[in-house]
Image (spheres, rainbow, N blue to C red):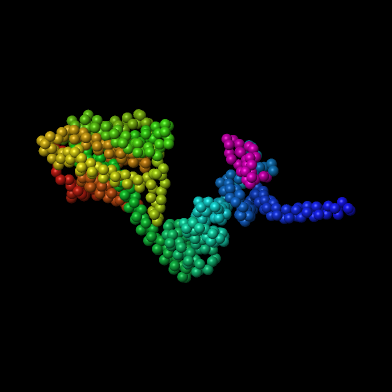
Amino acid sequence: MRFIQNNLFGFLLLWGFLFFGLQATSPTLAAEDNLTTHIGTMAAANFTALSKQIEALAATGDPRVVPILEALAKGRLFFRKSDKKVVFATKVKRRYKLSDPLSGDTLGEVKKSKVKKIRVNNKLRRQIRTVLGGLTLLSPDPKVRLKAAEAIFKSGDATALPALEAAIVQELDTDIRAVLRQARAVAVLKSDRPDEDKKAALTILEARGDRDALSVVTAVARTSTGDLKAIADRTVTTIQETLELWNIVQNIWYGLSLGSVLLLAAIGLAITFGVMGVINMAHGEMVMIGAYTTFVVQDIIRTSAPELFDYSLAIALPLAFLVAGGVGVAIERGVIRFLYGRPLETLLATWGVSLVLQQTVRTIFGPTNREVGAPDFMSGAFEIGHLTITYNRLWIIVFSLMVMVALMMLLKYTALGLQMRAVTQNRKMAGAMGIRTNWIDAATFGLGSGLAGIAGVALSQIDNVSPNLGQSYIIDSFMVVVFGGVGNLWGTLVGALTLGIANKFLEPFAGAVLAKVFVLIFIILFIQKRPRGLFALKGRAIES
């Protein structure tokens, strides 16, 4: 008795510590046990029971639930047959590597027969997507919150409304808050909220104005009545008109993109054809040589100096110009100079040269496509309204205009340009004034071929690098040159952009092949009325 009285304070202190300590830790322990229980009962559960466990896990609000549900949706959640323990399983050859879904501790490897997958159907996958959206709406990572809001927008689950409304209040990022409001609008339209709330939701979706919003509003218009239906019908019409307008803008952008590619491929041809009157069927192979030069440069950089990869195109541009230009000069000096004034023989000879170049490339590099990478500054895209603009296409448009300006300055402000223009306008008079017309022909052919090589560098970023690369653009290049006016650079620019935009507007109605056929028919009819093209060049080209 004396012992108890002497140590009463100690007993009281110990009792208070245990009581308050257990009180403080019991919620955590209870939550842990609760989470473990819900996970454990997922083993061998049927779809109905599994749905209830998914809801129960979501109700805990524990962030550790997210990877568990993601694994369940992806078919990576298993249970051991021996003790029904739920585990993560990763296939390693013929065995499975197991880990604990809560702690992440490794649980060793077992044979496939020792575990069984927890299976889900499409309905459960949709439920999991919705639940994950609600769990990640308050994530500290903005990308996770945005992805969760977009997932709820697509699912339109009305049960996510409380989570959405709570997230909207706390969200500080303007763009994410806008997506959250749009997701809430979809959820409201699929809920039993009053019509006034649904009318406000329709206004939000009208402002979004994309195809996802259109599908949601169209469904509302079909199932609603009265004023709500009338407002939904008007919203459908407004969104459709907006999409049609953006579709026109998109076709113009695609047309400009295609036109810039045609400009790069045709601008060198405009020089050689305009000055020399040579129908060079090997011009497409100069484009192909430029593309393969880019591949070789990048291959060397990858193996020797990978830190320079972002500068690979800058290194490839002058090399492609020199290689393709050198090949062009060799073709002019070795073949074409003996065939001036004989267009049919020139056409057949250059066609033969193109076949030789294609086979040479196949022998060296093989017949398969070669991979050419994009530097960081040409990767990715950005959006303007409903228009997606990729950086590689944007840079090619800018680059083609830069090449155009540089070429015009060369022709106007340099001695070589002056002599080329003199030969174009009157070859005999230029020769009489001391201009070596044969060397101007070689320089012109080399310049045109070098420009084609530069075009190959750009085309390697948007097309497959293969021995047949140039054949895809040679006919279109001739059409651009003839339509714009032989030898006229402004005509080449206008012709390339016009044909590019025309192709993109015709393709949705006629298909890619028929669109080209219609463009070709148009050019034939146009040339009947204006044989010298849109911008006729004053003077005369090479004469026989």
Q: Specify the principal SS of the magenta part.
A: strand
Counting from the top left corner in percent of width and height, residue 481 is at 23, 44
Taking the image as drawn, is residue 329 in sight? yes
| Residue 273 falls in image quadrant | top left
Position of 35 with respect to 181 (left or right) is right
The answer to whether residue 403 is left or right of residue 439 is: right
Outermost residue to the front: 6
Which residue is the extreme one toward the right? 1
Whether 519 is among the magenta residues is no
The residue sitting at 20% across, 49% down in the picture is 534
The x and y percentages for residue 327 are: 27, 32
Tell me what residue is drawn at x 55 percent, y 53 percent: 139
The magenta-colored residue range is 84-109
Check the image and name the residue furthest to the bottom: 226
Residue 435 sits in quarter: top left
Residue 513: x %, y % from top left? 32, 46
Task: Tell me, yes or no, if residue 528 can be seen here.
Answer: no
- The image shows residue 508, relative to residue 328, as above or below, that is below
Compared to residue 234, the image places residue 64 above or below, namely above
Task: Indicate the position of residue 277 as horizontal and vertical percent values.
Answer: 19, 39
Viewer-nearest residue: 268 or 351? 268
Quadrant for the C terminus, please: top left
Residue in the foreground of this view, choosing between 158 and 448: 448
Residue in the foreground of this view, choosing between 416 and 324: 416
Residue located at (40% from left, 36% from top) = 308
